Image (cartoon, grey):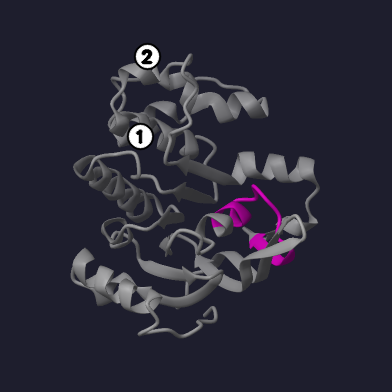
Amino acid sequence: MHAAHIMTVQNVTKTFSQGSRHVHALRDVSLNIDEGSFVAIMGASGSGKSTLLHLMSGLTRPTAGAIIVDGYDLSELSDRELTHFRRQQIGLVFQAFNLVPSLNATDNILFPLFAAGTPIDDSTDLTDIASRLGIEDRLSHRPDSLSGGEQQRVAIARSLITNPAIIFADEPTGSLDSVTGQSICKLLRELCDQQNRTIVVVTHEPSVAIWADEVVVLKDGQIVEQFPTNRHQDSQSLASHYQAVISGNETAIVQPA
């Protein structure tokens, strides 16, 4: 029995204009994301992976095609409705953490609720989230007194506070050392397994992608392969397969299941 699709990307194209030139960042991309799955999107610089994440998270709109999240077609939402939808249904985690330096960890985590005008009371999930992420004793600290790993955990907590439909993470380990980066991957894996969170990670690192259930490989704005990670015993095996795909030795345009 297949899990329900929490997101469907239908024949999406994104074109940017640079003077008289038109740059096709994505070309007719289709993809389904199952509820409760952990998906890694891989590709070289310029492959379109960050553009795809921005489209899926509602940060920008496609030139053509449709993106449906939790039953909502994002193309049918006004800018105001889309902003509200993102605040409620989309969690975002970035490489640079994007924490507010003047706010302590508690206020950074609660910031999406402040921005949405949501009343905050004792029933907030803050304590439970902070405990799960191992930062309950760091909530009064500002970002400059937190380690990189702690800052990223605060950023993940912030992405969880609205109980979103999907969490998107853009190179979430890129600013961290390898040991801390792997601890963040383990945390994302646990959120998926224990809380049935849907997680989409953009990465160029096989050591990150191996934690996912499935890998989607982009090249020149198209999906060239989609494969489950359980085919690979470790990140080295996954890396070899990925390199073969992007070098053209194993290339097949993949349509969504």
Question: Which portion, as a residue range, is magenta?
Answer: 53-68
Cα–Cα span, label 1 and label 2: 14 Å
Type of amino acid under label 2: Ser
Which image quadrant is residue 248 in? Answer: bottom left
Q: Nearer the viewer, residue 90 or 23?
A: 23
Type of amino acid under label 1: Arg
Badge 1 element: helix
Q: State the image coordinates of residue 143 (x, y, percent, origin top left).
A: 38, 21
User: Is residue 175 among the parts visible in the rendering?
Assistant: yes
Q: Nearer the viewer, residue 50 or 191?
A: 50
Look at mark 1 in the image and give the residue it sits on: 153
Q: Nearer the viewer, residue 131 or 65?
A: 65
Disc marking residue 140: 2
Name the quadrant of the N terminus: bottom left
Q: Residue at x 50, y 22 (%)?
A: 100
Total numbered labels placed on residues in the image: 2
Mark before the other along the chain sequence, 1 or 2:
2
Q: Residue at x 39, y 30 (%)?
A: 154
User: Is residue 118 among the parts visible in the rendering?
Assistant: no
Q: Residue at x 31, y 31 (%)?
A: 148
Badge 2 element: loop
Q: State the image coordinates of residue 48 (x, y, percent, origin top left).
A: 54, 62
Q: Residue at x 78, y 51 (%)?
A: 77
